[in-house]
Amino acid sequence: MATTVPRPMSAEEKKVIFASSLGTVFEWYDFYLYGSLAAVIAKQFFGGLDPTSAYIFALLAFAAGFLVRPFGALVFGRLGDMIGRKYTFLVTILIMGLSTFIVGCLPTYATIGLAAPVILIALRMLQGLALGGEYGGAATYVAEHSPQGKRGAYTAWIQTTATLGLFLSLIVILLTREFTSYAVSAPGVTPVVTAFDDWGWRVPFLVSILLLGVSVYIRLSMNESPAFTKMKAEGKTSKAPLSESFGQWKNLKIVILALVGLTAGQAVVWYTGQFYALFFLTSIAKVDPKTANLLIAAALVIGTPFFIVFGSLSDKIGRKPIIMAGCLLAAVTYFTVFPMLLSYANPKLVAAQKAIPVVVTADFARCSFQGSPIARQIDFTSSCDIAKRTLTENYVPYQNVAAPAGTEATVKIGETLIPSLVGVLNDKRDAFSPDSAKAIAAFKKAVVDAAKAGGLTVKADDATMNTPMVLAVLVYLVILVTMVYGPIAAMLVEMFPTRIRYTSMSLPYHIGNGWFGGLLPTTAFAMVAATGDIFYGLWYPVVVAAGTFIIGMIFIKETKDVDIYAND
């Protein structure tokens, strides 16, 4: 195998690589603002739905940005391989930044109705297209500037940008929450009121226009990749990178292996360790959002240097062993780590769940899939649906027991038995009838009161939370992220020839991260809602990570000594 050694990097090239990484941080900041504010987005733009459906729709809108990322990879990857990396960067950052700014200006559902979520989803899709063209270019650009034997270390800086962008979004959100909170004096008490959910959530989106200006300035100062410049001067650029990448089996085979043997597992580990961990803390462990964000931010600060550690280590021992080890550890430890996270974060809740069993007894033939992303509250009319929906909305875990056919469902919380009821729609079939709505509200109140009395809805208490151990678990999850993500940019770059590198590596990366990873929050939440088991959603990342480990170990070859200047 060829081992051509490029000249050492100049100070100017190092500056350009730093500028590339910094611009990418801002782009990830824009993209992840939405994910960090999913609960607020649900209230503002999906207000016509019940809370559970609204949250699922908000997560789906978040996922929409991921779904179109592979198409962005095709569009911008083709441009990057044909006209160059630098100018493609400028287009992607402009689309991302302007889309984010417009979200901050967008009227809510209460103001313009259905148009609000439609426009929001369209903007998310534009963001996804832009990001689809960003990562492959950034990774390719940095790798093509890196000296032989240092590609893992240099491209690892690009790998930090996604986490740093998430970290930056969390910090801006926390600061905005603080500045939009104010005290209201009342007799004997001074409550704190926050305007964040009303209008403060817009501030992080609007601030992005400043980051856009900085990012565009940075991108304009960049030079074209030397590998692309050399290839262009020699007249060897691809005239049809899409057909070369995906129409020739020798290249398509590598694309498929890169997806199922690398990026799918990397993606689910990444999103489980950061986004699902945040969802788990706030929704299931019932940790205050501010506390949860601070804990995640602290874990990111501690764990982020390990991107560089594992990227540098991959230059010595190879990319494959580190990525495969991360996938394996995730698959075998998630079902241990997340129960630990719950017990450390909210021990009172765990104690209540053990002491007070919750059982839904129902005719399963009358039970709908609670995680349906298109269902509304009125689509759940059976007694089984209403019972499960009520528990799901309050994140109360439950067991399912089969009842004889035709039996109406019941909810038993400890020794309290609460009969459920069938919902009756009004004549227009667009809402429950007044009497039915009143009866359902009474049922829900009885369930919530019983759950509350049993301690099943208790909020996490800072006084009883084992904060150091919660942080330790979160750091462990982030370190798994750094293992699978730190070396992967260098490995993907090294798998494909220069003439089609941007296009070829972008597609498997964005299908893996956009579809396998981006759909993880929605899928895992739907699995929890469907079964009543708060840990059931973990099966999704465990199965995908295990599958990637098996396929990767068998079919993926080590790449650290590949000559990336080769065009064949």
Image (cartoon, rainbow, N blue to C red):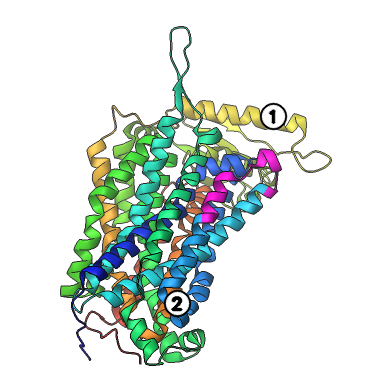
User: Is residue 107 highlighted in magenta?
Assistant: yes
Where, by quadrant of the figure, is residue 14 drawn?
A: bottom left
Q: Residue at x 25, y 80 (%)?
A: 558
Can you identify the residue that label 2 sits on? 80
Q: Which residues are magenta?
A: 98-115
Whichever of labels 2 and 1 marks the residue nearer the N terminus, that label is 2
Q: Give the farthest residue toward the right.
A: 427
Q: In whole angstroms, how far apart are the C-alphas of marks 2 and 1?
A: 60 Å
Residue 469 x, y percent position in the rendering = 23, 41
Can you identify the residue that label 1 sits on? 439
Residue 408 x, y percent position in the rendering = 65, 40
Q: Amino acid at mark 2?
A: Gly
Name the quadrant of the N terminus.
bottom left
Kind of element beneath mark 1: helix
Judge whether 562 appears above or below 180 on screen. Answer: below
Crowding at label 1, few (<14), some or many (≥20) Cα neighbours within 10 Å?
Answer: some
Count of numbered labels shown in the rendering: 2
Q: Residue at x 23, y 79 (%)?
A: 560
Tag of residue 556: none
Q: Report the side of 178 relative to 205 (left or right).
A: left
Marks 2, 1: nearer the viewer: 2
Q: Report the side of 45 relative to 192 (left or right).
A: right
Compare residues 338 and 159 and report the one nearer the observer: 159
